[in-house]
Amino acid sequence: MTPEEAWSKGTNVLAAYRTDPARVEATLILLLKETLTYLEYNKTIRADQDLLDAVHHLRDTFPAMKLEEWAIIMNRLKTGEYRPGYERLKLPELCDIFQQYEGERAAVREGNWTELKKHAPDRLSDGQLDTLYENYKKRRAEQKEDLEKAREIKPVQVDERGRWEHIPYKSPQEEEVQQERGSQEA
């Protein structure tokens, strides 16, 4: 996957972390751990807590990164495109590599933006603005209707055990189980 595809089609790390923190955390730790193991540097992150701290720091420091971009960075480390010096790869070197990647990505995005601006109109006409506002009003009205429908949904009545009251839960075996328990305790 190219960096352009990763940026346009990728999943943001923080957004993914909000939906499934354990899976995202495990993925990032695994990506970093496999890369560090593969590189076999003399001075690198070895302790589990240091690995966790590095992932947390990188995730918080570079919130715009996509999961796919993390994979690209780790692949580039393995292939030697990013070469930290002196057989050392700790958190400061990782931060430098992530910053270098962000710089490369910014240059590409800036080029895409200037290309897009060449083809976009400078100003919108009044008719185009009115159309945009009407579409926005329609979307807001639909959202409001959906919220009203959701409020009309009545909660299901449950009994003290959390079971739905409108479904009969009669178990003839329950009395037999209680009798057996009573006879075993005696």
Image (tube, rainbow, N blue to C red):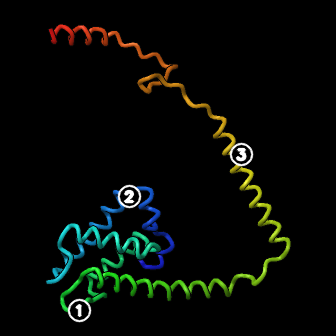
Upstream in sequence: badge 3 or badge 1 = 1
How dense is the environment of label 2, judged by Cα within 10 Å: few (below 14), some, or many (20 and up)? some
Is residue 162 rendered to the left or right of residue 45?
right
- Mark number, residue 85: 1
Q: Callout 1: helix, strand or loop?
A: loop
The spot of residue 15 in percent (x, y) is 47, 63
Q: Callout 3: helix, strand or loop?
A: helix
Residue furthest right as drawn: 126
The spot of residue 131 in percent (x, y) is 80, 66
Establish if 11 lies above or below 174.
Answer: below
Q: Callout 2: helix, strand or loop?
A: helix
Upstream in sequence: badge 2 or badge 1 = 2
Residue 20, image quadrant: bottom left
Establish if 128 lies above or below 39.
Answer: above
Q: Looking at the image, do the residues carrying marks 3 and 1 touch, with CB atoms under 8 Å apart?
A: no
- Residue under the image location 69 percent in, 84 percent down: 119
Establish if 112 lies above or below 178.
Answer: below
Reading the image, the residue beneath label 3 is: 145
Q: Identify which amino acid the numbered label 1 is placed on.
A: Gly
